[in-house]
Amino acid sequence: MSANALALGAIALWASLAALGVALSHVPPFLLTGLSLLMGSAIALPLSRFDWRQWKVPASTLALGVYGLFGFHFLLFIALRHAPPVQANLVNYLWPLGIVVMAPLFLPGVSLTKRHVLAALLGFAGAALAILGRGGSAEVVWAWGYIPAAASAFIWASYSLLTKRVKPFPTAAIGSFALVSGLLSLACHALLEPSSALSNQDWLLIAVLGLGPLGGAFFLWDAALKRGDARQIGVLSFLTPLLSTLTLLLLRGEMPGLPVVLAAAMIIGAAVLATRR
């Protein structure tokens, strides 16, 4: 239960990402990601009690962390630029399904039951309904951006599972992952994006983004994976698009429609099905 609670904490923080992203939509994405990850890496300081030794990990583990944090966002940004955003986002949300179905391939001693497969499919259907039910077009139009969207989903699912395969490392080491990934994002900004001036409000929201969905959530996620069943955590992750949609509706003063209500029932049902003993 403690692992599921930690995972739900990360999911709750990720649910605020869309709302913060809308408020900061004028900021170039790589600049936004780089600054947020650098601020998020600072969480490791109090977490490690300012013991820098906890930040140190083998080079292979650091490479895995950068693969997850930087690779996921890099490919997601490419996908959103070269495919319809709603459909690209839906493809990207294959990562919870990937965690569930790939767990037996990456983790020794883990098997996939019919119950987990059913819960994963039900959860993905609910996530799709939550995204498309916001008013986006459900029409499928091919765009090459779907490829990096799917690759982004694979990266986050495989990163999440592979952290359970490498030599154990303290959760504070996520600060190293975020620090290097943030610097790489800023390098991409310098090479690929125009310069941008930030207001005081922008800096405040970026700090919230760094402490929350692009910072604190990664530490909670790592702690959850270290303690819990990756299959259960993967199914719980389908709550992310649902909560994100509800957050946006709340900020706009809108009531959730029937598709969102049905999506909530499907995702909650999937979570109950996956976590029951």
Image: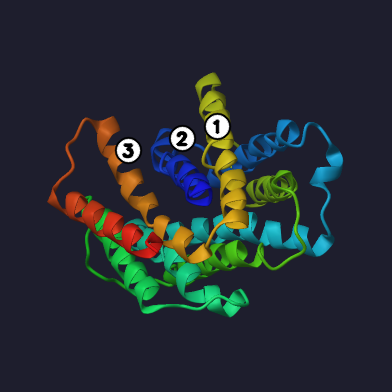
Do the numbered discs 3 and 2 sit on residues whose CB atoms are within 8 Å?
no
Q: Which amino acid does label 1 sit on?
A: Ile
Nearer to us in this view, 269 or 16: 269
Residue 259: image x %, image y %?
17, 54
Which residue appears farthest toward the front when viewing the image?
277
Q: Distance between the residues labelled 1 and 2?
A: 8 Å
> Which residue does the numbered mark 1 point to in the structure image?
206
Nearer to us in this view, 32 or 92: 92
Point out the tag, 1 or 2, that comes first from the N-terminus.
2
Q: Is residue 53 visible?
A: yes
Do the numbered discs 1 and 2 sit on residues whose CB atoms are within 8 Å?
yes
The residue mark sitting in front, 1 or 3, is 3
The residue mark sitting in front, 1 or 2, is 1
Which residue appears farthest toward the left when viewing the image?
258
Q: Which numbered marker is on residue 247?
A: 3
Q: Measured along the vertical axis of the image, is residue 277 above or below residue 203?
A: below
The residue under the point 75% across, 33% down is 45
Instruction: Say left or right for 139 vs 194.
Output: left
Residue 231: image x %, image y %?
48, 66
> Which residue does the numbered mark 2 point to in the structure image?
24
Point out the tag, 1 or 3, that comes first from the N-terminus.
1
Which color scheme does this rendered protein use? rainbow
